[in-house]
Amino acid sequence: MRVSWEVDGGVHHLTFRLDPEDEVTGFCADGEPLTLATNSCRIELPRASRDLHPDLPALAAWTVVAPWTRRAVVFDRPISPELAEAIRSGWAVEAGPVGAAPRSGAGPATDGLAISYSGGADSVAVAAMLPEAPFVHFQRVSHPRVPNRWTHYRADVLAGLAERTGRELTVVRSDLEFTLARPRPGYPEHHAVAAGALLLADELGLGGLAFGYELGSRWLGGDRYLLRFTPDNPMWAPHGAWGRAFAAAGVHLVLPVGGVSEAVTMRLALGSELRAQVRWCLRGVNGPCGTCGKCLYKELIQAAVERRPLRTTIGPGRPVARKWQEPPPYGGQEMIEYGCARVPGVEETVFGRAAAYLGATEVSTSWLDRCYPPAIEEIPERWRGRVRDFMTEEVGLMSDREARRVETWGTIRGTP
């Protein structure tokens, strides 16, 4: 893989060329097959960036091209030995040229920590925990060479909501999601959402970037893994390939809500000053669309937190509800159990069959109201104390017995 950047003011143009051994169909770190649509993308910053440490544009490019690179990646400027080793050990890919000094990742801005802010409940929960941290928001824009067949994705609405938070905000606009032809426009790697933040890291003085990935995504396997306890999650474990690569570039991955469930992040988000800007739906304009699968899933969680019946007109025959008519396992199953155990009248809803299959109760799901302590310990020491204090005071920590529920997920009754 050959990678090059051209910079025109605040616009960074990335072009890459496959080597003979590289493949047009590759795989994301979570195993999703991805087919390449084009070999270029752009990242628009709100202003021209200052001189960048070479590891930053290299890592930004790597978040885009990693799925299709098989043997080697050649960047357009020398990188540090630390980043080259992280890529070699994480992907068995030789990276170069090598010759830059390592980046320290030290800076004055909010202890060098920013939030990759989407506006969803998990992201807003992080914002509630870190009220001084600036936001970096990624906004999808169209690609000049790839048709946009997902015009219902309202990235403009989400960016507008981010602007109304009143927080220090940088909006990064990019068409990098259109490098994918299959399954649809999306991040080549989940970490590509951070490409703009990486290009701004020196200017913002970043030593870390906080994401809203929660207990299910970090520890319980996520949607596309085998649904089991996953301490070595290749996407989000600090000791995993991506964690080591970001650390080598001096921008640590930080998961402040990595130890709590979506019920906790929902409760924190709805209780925060940003409640009016919370939006997990990618389609709605004047509010959530109420008809997509994400709306249905989050409505179950919100209804459980608020102890009320579901507010949805979606019937069991709708495509977005059909999976809940089948036996488990389900993606995000811990939250389906949590919701089914708490929503009044759930047996008469689209989740009725799932509730019957799962047989969950408030007692069997009570562990999801507290924080898994090892998630705090893997946060870099620089920010660990404030996360521990918040979780101890506002959420509560799991007992040893409750922590075992996390660590045996997938192997005991009531889990997949």
Image (cartoon, rainbow, N blue to C red):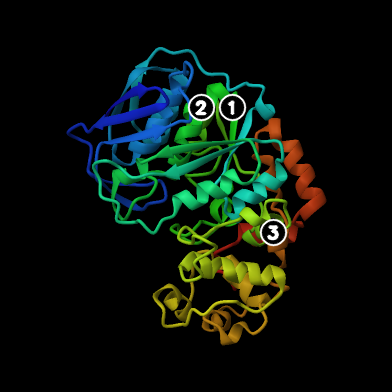
- Pointer 2 and pointer 3: residues touching (CB < 8 Å)? no
Q: Nearer the viewer, residue 342 or 372?
A: 342
Residue 92: x and y in percent read: 35, 33
From this view, report whether residue 405 is shown above or below residue 73: below
Q: Earlier in the sequence, mark 2 or mark 1?
A: 2
Q: Nearer the viewer, residue 31 or 14?
A: 14
Q: In the rendered structure, which amino acid carries the disc numbered 2?
A: Leu
Q: Nearer the viewer, mark 1 or mark 3?
A: 3
Question: What distance separates the C-alpha of mark 2 from that of mark 3?
Answer: 30 Å
Task: Give the labeled residue for mark 3.
Answer: 270
Give the image quarter of residue 175. Answer: top left
Q: In the rendered structure, which amino acid carries the disc numbered 1?
A: Leu
Label 1, residues with CA under 10 Å away: few <14, some 14-19, many ≥20? many
Task: Give the labeled residue for mark 2.
Answer: 200
Label 3, residues with CA under 10 Å away: few <14, some 14-19, many ≥20? many
Residue 173: x and y in percent read: 43, 38
Element marked by disc 1: loop
Label 2, residues with CA under 10 Å away: few <14, some 14-19, many ≥20? many
Asked whether residue 326 appears in the rendered view, the answer is yes
Task: Give the labeled residue for mark 1.
Answer: 206
